[in-house]
C-alpha cells in the first residue's frame, strides 16, 4: 500500500526551516568554540539541580554484544551520558590518553554530543575501564595526562571527566598511611592533574568517579598502605576522593562485580540484595575509620555527592539487583522506610541522595529499557528538580592564630545550608585568595608589621554563595622573622557555674591582647582542656573531690597569660550519664548525653572537637 500525505502549509514549512537553522547553528558553535577554548554547551553542573534525581549511564565506544547505539538515540531517561572509554595510548605509565569515536566520523560525533547537550543532557568522557590501566608514576606522565585530556575535552566539547580507574591503576606504597596526606605518586599525581583540568575549564567542569567497592568501602577493613599481607590497592581511591571532594560532583561506586564487604556493623554483606546497597551507601553518608583506625576517619560525603552504581541487567555484570530490591534500598536510604533487612542505617534518611548510575546504556536498551524506565518513574516521584537558589548561612566567628611576620592561620565556624555546603571562599580585602573545603586556611606571603582584613563566604552544591562574614583585622609581626611577644591579660572573674559528681562548668571574662586572643587553657592537676570561648565544661572528674582549676589565655603568636584560679568540689556520686566532652577517653558502652539525647559508645576512642556524638555515627549510637 502506498500512503499519500498532504503537502505541508507554507507556515509549517517556515517553522521547519527555522528549527533546522537553529540546529545547524548549535552544531556549528559546538565545533567552532572548542577550538577557541570556549565551549558554549558546557553549562554549569548546577544546571542539573542538586535536588533533581539523576540517572547516569555509560555509553559503549565499542560493541561487546550489547549492540551499538548512536549518542542521539540514547534513551531520554538518562540525564548524564558517560562516554566509555578514553584509554592510554602510550603505555600504562606514559600518561598520554587517546580517544577515537567508534563507528563515527569526528564531525558526526561532535554533532551528536552537541545534540544531547541541547536536550539538557551532560556528556562526560570516562577514563580507564577494565582494559584502560593508567598509572601516573612521574611528573612527565602527569603532564602528558593533563595535555592529552585537555585536547580530548576541548575537541569534542565534553562537559566533564569521569575517573573509572580499575585494575592496578591505583595502589598505595607501604607506609602511606594517612589518606588525608598521601605520598604515593600515582595518587598525588592524579589528584593534582584532575585539579589542574578543573581549574583550566572552570567551575562548570564536572567531575565524577566510579570506583569498585574494593577501592572504597573495603578501606574500612583494610587500607593498602598500612596493613600487612593485604592488597596494596585496598581503599586506594579514598585519598583521591578526599583530595578532590571540594570539586567532586558525585561518587558512583560500582556496587556490582564485588566480593562480600564488611559494613559499619562489622558484618559481611553480599551484592545483589537491598541490604548490600544500603550498607555500602550508608558508609559514604556516615563516614568510617580507615583500616578501623578511629583516629583516621574518612568524612562523610554530602548526600548529593552519592550515586548508587548498578548493572542494567544480568549480562552487564555480577550482582544484578532487581528493580524491586533496588527500590527497597532507596526507600530505606531516602525515606527511612524499613524493609526488615539485617542492616540498620547509621545515618538518618537522606532524601537528597543524588540518584542511580548503570553499566550501561547499551545493556539497558538490550534489556528493553527495564532499568531506565522503572527507575526514572521512581526517581521522578521525588520532585521536578527546581533549581536551588538558597544561599548558605554566613560563616561566623572568624579568628586568627599563629600570626608571624609573613602569615596567619584563619579559622571559622561551619555554615549551614538546605542542601549542603561544599566549600568556603577566603578573601583578603576584596580579593579571593583561596577556596577550601574545611573551616580553616593558612595565609602565607604577607608583609611584616602590616594590617590585613580577611572575610569568608560559604558556597553550596548549586553554586549559591553566602554573604561575607564579619571582617577580621590582623596585623603581622615585625620583620626579621620575629613574632609577637606580648602575652594576653589574665582571664578575670573565673566562676563555677554548675557542677555534678563528675563535671564542673566554669566561666570567665575575656582577656585582652594586642593581636587577639585565640583561646584558653583550663588546667587541673596534670590534666588540661582547651576552650575557644569563655566557658568550659570539665568532665571525667571523681565524685566528692576538691579540684583547683587554673585558666590561662593564649594569643595568635602562642603567648600565654598568667593564670587565674578557682576551687570546686564535685558532688557525691549520682546516677545518669555525663555530658560528652572533647579530650575524653571513651570505651565501648560508655554513656554520654549531648544536646538532650543519650548515646552509647560503639568504638573506643579519645574524643576530639568535631566528633560530637550526633556527627560521628561510626563512634556513637543513639540510645
Image (cartoon, grey):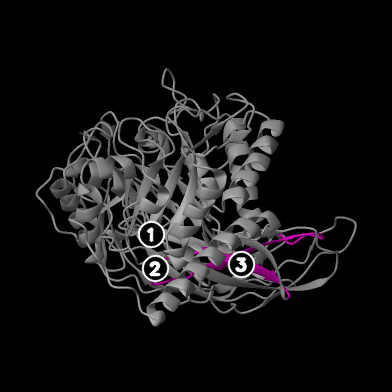
Residue 468, horizontal then vertical, whole percent:
60, 78
| Residue under label 2 | 419
Sooner in the amino-acid sequence: mark 2 or mark 1: 1
Sooner in the amino-acid sequence: mark 3 or mark 2: 2
Residue 412, horizontal then vertical, whole percent:
56, 67
Which residue is found at the position 39% from the left and 65% from the top?
50
Mark 2: few, some, or many residues within 10 Å (few <14, many ≥20)? some
In the image, is residue 48 part of the stretch drawn in magenta? no
Q: How many numbered marks have been drawn onto this rendered protein structure? A: 3
Which residue is found at the position 80% from the left and 66% from the top?
476
| Residue under label 1 | 304
- Tell me, yes or no, whether the two marked residues, 2 and 1, touch with CB atoms within 8 Å: yes
Q: Nearer the viewer, mark 1 or mark 3?
A: 1
Mark 3: few, some, or many residues within 10 Å (few <14, many ≥20)? some
Label disc, if present, on residue 617 of the rendered structure: none
Question: Can the viewer see residue 461 in this picture?
Answer: no
Label disc, if present, on residue 425 of the rendered structure: 3
Label 3 SS: strand
Q: CA distance from mark 1 to mark 3?
A: 20 Å
Q: CA distance from mark 2 to mark 1?
A: 8 Å
Amino acid at each position: 500500500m502506498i500512503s499519500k500525505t498532504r503537502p505541508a502549509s507554507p507556515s509549517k514549512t517556515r517553522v521547519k526551516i527555522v528549527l533546522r537553522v537553529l540546529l545547524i547553528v548549535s552544531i556549528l558553535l559546538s565545533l567552532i568554540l572548542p577550538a577557541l577554548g570556549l565551549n558554549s554547551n558546557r553549562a554549569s553542573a548546577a544546571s542539573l539541580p542538586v535536588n533533581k534525581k539523576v540517572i547516569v549511564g555509560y555509553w559503549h565506544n565499542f560493541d561487546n554484544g550489547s549492540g551499538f547505539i548512536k549518542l542521539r538515540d540514547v534513551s531520554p531517561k538518562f540525564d548524564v551520558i558517560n562516554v566509555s572509554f578514553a584509554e592510554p595510548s602510550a603505555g600504562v605509565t606514559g600518561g598520554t590518553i587517546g580517544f577515537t569515536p567508534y563507528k563515527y566520523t569526528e564531525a558526526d560525533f561532535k554533532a551528536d554530543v552537541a545534540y544531547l547537550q541541547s536536550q539538557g543532557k551532560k556528556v562526560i568522557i570516562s577514563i580507564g575501564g577494565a582494559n584502560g590501566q593508567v598509572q601516573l608514576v612521574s611528573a612527565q606522565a602527569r603532564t602528558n595526562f593533563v595535555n592529552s585530556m585537555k585536547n580530548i575535552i576541548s575537541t569534542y566539547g565534553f562537559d566533564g571527566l569521569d575517573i573509572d580507574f580499575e585494575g592496578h591503576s591505583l595502589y598505595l606504597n607501604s607506609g602511606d598511611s594517612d589518606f588525608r596526606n598521601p605520598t604515593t605518586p600515582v595518587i598525588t599525581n592524579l589528584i593534582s592533574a584532575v585539579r589542574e583540568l578543573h581549574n583550566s575549564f572552570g567551575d562548570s567542569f564536572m567531575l565524577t568517579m566510579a570506583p569498585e567497592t574494593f577501592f572504597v568501602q573495603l578501606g574500612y577493613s583494610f587500607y593498602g598502605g598500612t596493613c600487612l599481607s593485604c592488597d596494596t590497592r585496598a581503599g586506594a581511591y579514598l585519598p583521591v576522593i578526599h583530595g578532590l571532594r571540594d570539586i567532586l560532583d558525585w561518587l558512583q561506586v560500582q556496587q556490582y562485580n564485588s566480593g562480600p564487604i564488611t559494613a559499619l556493623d562489622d558484618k559481611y554483606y553480599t551484592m545483589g540484595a537491598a541490604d548490600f546497597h544500603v550498607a555500602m551507601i550508608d558508609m559514604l553518608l556516615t563516614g568510617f575509620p580507615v583500616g578501623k583506625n578511629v583516629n583516621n576517619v574518612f568524612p562523610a560525603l554530602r548526600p548529593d555527592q552519592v550515586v548508587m552504581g548498578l548493572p542494567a541487567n544480568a549480562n552487564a555484570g555480577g550482582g544484578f539487583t532487581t528493580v524491586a530490591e533496588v527500590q527497597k534500598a532507596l526507600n530505606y536510604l531516602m525515606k527511612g522506610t524499613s524493609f526488615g533487612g539485617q542492616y540498620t542505617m547509621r545515618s538518618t534518611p537522606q532524601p537528597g541522595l543524588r540518584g542511580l548510575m548503570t553499566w550501561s546504556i547499551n545493556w539497558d536498551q538490550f534489556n528493553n529499557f527495564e532499568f531506565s524506565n522503572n527507575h526514572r518513574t521512581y526517581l521522578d516521584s521525588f520532585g521536578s528538580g527546581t533549581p536551588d537558589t538558597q544561599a548558605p548561612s554566613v560563616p561566623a566567628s572568624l579568628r586568627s592564630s599563629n600570626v608571624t611576620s609573613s602569615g596567619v592561620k584563619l579559622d571559622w565556624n561551619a555554615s549551614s545550608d538546605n542542601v549542603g555546603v561544599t566549600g568556603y571562599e577566603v578573601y583578603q580585602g576584596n580579593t579571593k585568595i583561596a577556596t577550601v573545603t574545611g573551616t580553616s586556611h593558612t595565609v602565607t606571603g604577607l608583609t611584616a608589621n602590616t594590617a590585613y582584613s580577611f572575610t569568608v563566604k560559604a558556597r553550596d552544591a548549586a553554586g549559591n554563595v553566602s554573604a561575607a562574614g564579619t571582617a577580621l583585622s590582623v596585623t603581622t609581626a615585625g620583620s626579621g622573622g620575629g613574632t609577637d611577644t606580648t602575652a594576653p591579660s589574665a582571664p578575670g572573674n573565673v566562676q563555677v557555674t554548675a557542677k555534678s559528681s563528675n563535671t564542673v562548668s566554669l566561666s570567665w571574662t575575656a582577656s585582652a591582647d594586642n593581636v587577639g586572643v585565640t583561646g584558653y587553657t583550663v588546667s587541673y592537676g596534670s590534666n588540661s582542656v582547651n576552650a575557644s570561648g569563655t566557658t568550659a565544661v570539665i568532665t571525667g572528674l571523681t565524685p566528692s573531690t576538691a579540684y583547683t582549676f587554673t585558666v590561662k589565655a593564649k594569643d595568635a603568636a602562642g603567648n600565654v597569660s598568667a593564670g587565674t584560679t578557682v576551687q570546686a568540689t564535685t558532688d557525691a556520686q549520682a546516677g545518669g550519664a555525663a555530658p560528652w566532652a572533647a579530650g575524653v577517653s571513651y570505651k565501648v558502652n560508655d554513656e554520654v548525653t549531648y544536646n538532650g539525647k543519650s548515646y552509647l559508645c560503639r568504638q573506643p576512642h579519645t574524643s576530639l572537637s568535631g566528633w560530637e556524638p550526633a556527627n560521628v555515627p561510626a563512634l556513637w549510637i543513639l540510645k
